[in-house]
Image: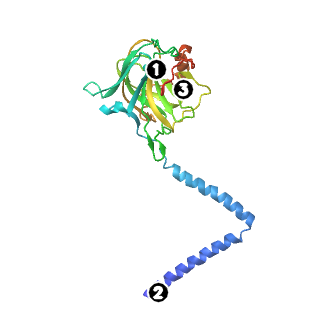
Amino acid sequence: MHCSVARSGLLETESRRVQAVGQSLYVLAIPPAVRRVYFVVSVPVLTSAFLAINMEGIKRPSAPFPLIYFSEPGSTEMCKTMSDADMGGYTKVNLDFVPGSEKEEPHARFHGNISIDLPPDRPHIQRTGYSGWRTKDRGATMFGKSLWDLGPYGYIGLRVKSDGRRYFVNVQTESIVPTDIHQHRLYTRTPGEWETVYISVGEFVRTNHGMVVEPQREMLTDKVRTIGMSLIDRVPGPFDLSIARIWATTRSSEEEKREDHSSEGLKTLQKGLKPEHAEKAEAPKLEGMP
């Protein structure tokens, strides 16, 4: 009986070999011209099927992508502040951590006082009256600079409490022109109260030293260096903006909450950056600021 089973196995193996040889001979028997067509048609079909199978496994991110969360005392140390004081001006700027309480979640308080006074000992400084903050560069890895890839995300979300002044959200990328900043006005509806704002990534406007740059180019969303906020209206007086967190999102779970100002993005920015704020020759150059 054992001999019968072994002999049956050998016969089955030999049958498979003969079948394989027969298929090979069949392919070789096909004329070369027809054989080329066969492979030209077969390879794309197989490739398309492979891609289709793999595409089924690709999904949009479902969770928010944290950019900066001011939830711990050390979180503000991951950022740097900037103002015309760095060039000799008199604007005061602070970014302080505020612990959470029963009424508020932990957050950072961006506050100070805008001054448009010019330094008397620096005649080349002709424009002052701005302040801002941004995240610090995150260093390098063995693969190069550490950058954010926001390509899969369509929106940037912000949890803020504003005093109603004209703030801008700034995104800096690893672009050819390092001083380029992509900006969008921070629209708030309830000054003095916490609210969530969503800004379309595609509606950010390319600027350089406070001036809208043409031609407009799409933001390099896969090479984002920093994110921050600024106040550049040159209106003297105190300012106070609280920020709990900033993140990237597909907005799939926040569709009804989004504040859609996409049609006003470029128009409002161009209106807000008046000539007296946008003269490139006279505007102070400050790293990370428009």
Residue 96: x %, y % from top left: 33, 25
Secondary structure beneath label 1: helix
From what the image shows, is residue 136 above or below residue 21?
above
Residue 138 image offset from top left, x and y in percent: 42, 38
Residue 205, disc: 3
**Label 2 neighbour load within 10 Å: few <14, some 14-19, many 20+:** few
Q: Amino acid at mark 1?
A: Met
Name the residue at 34% across, 26% down: 108
Checking the image for residue 87, the label placed there is 1
Indicate which disc, 1 or 2, sits on the residue closer to the N terminus: 2
Q: Which mark is residue 255?
A: none
Q: CA distance from mark 2 to mark 3?
A: 81 Å
Please report whichever mark, 2 or 3, sits nearer to the chain's N-terminal start.
2
Give me the residue at 50% from left, 83% from top: 8
**Circle nearer the viewer, 2 or 3:** 3
Give whichever of 6, 170 is nearer the camera. Answer: 170
Please identify the quarter of the rendering in which residue 217 is found: top right
Q: Position of residue 62 (x, y in %)?
A: 42, 40
**Label 3: element kind:** strand
**Mark closer to the chain start, 1 or 3:** 1
Q: Is residue 3 left or right of residue 24?
A: left
Q: Farthest left residue?
A: 102
Display coloring = rainbow
Image-quadrant location for residue 248:
top left
Residue at 75% from the left image edge and 63% from the top image edge: 33
Q: Which residue is mark 2?
A: 4
Q: Secondary structure at mark 2?
A: helix
Q: Position of residue 22 (x, y in %)?
A: 64, 75
Q: Is residue 49 visible?
A: yes
Three-letter residue code for mark 3: Val
Q: Gap between marks 1 and 3, in whole Å?
A: 26 Å
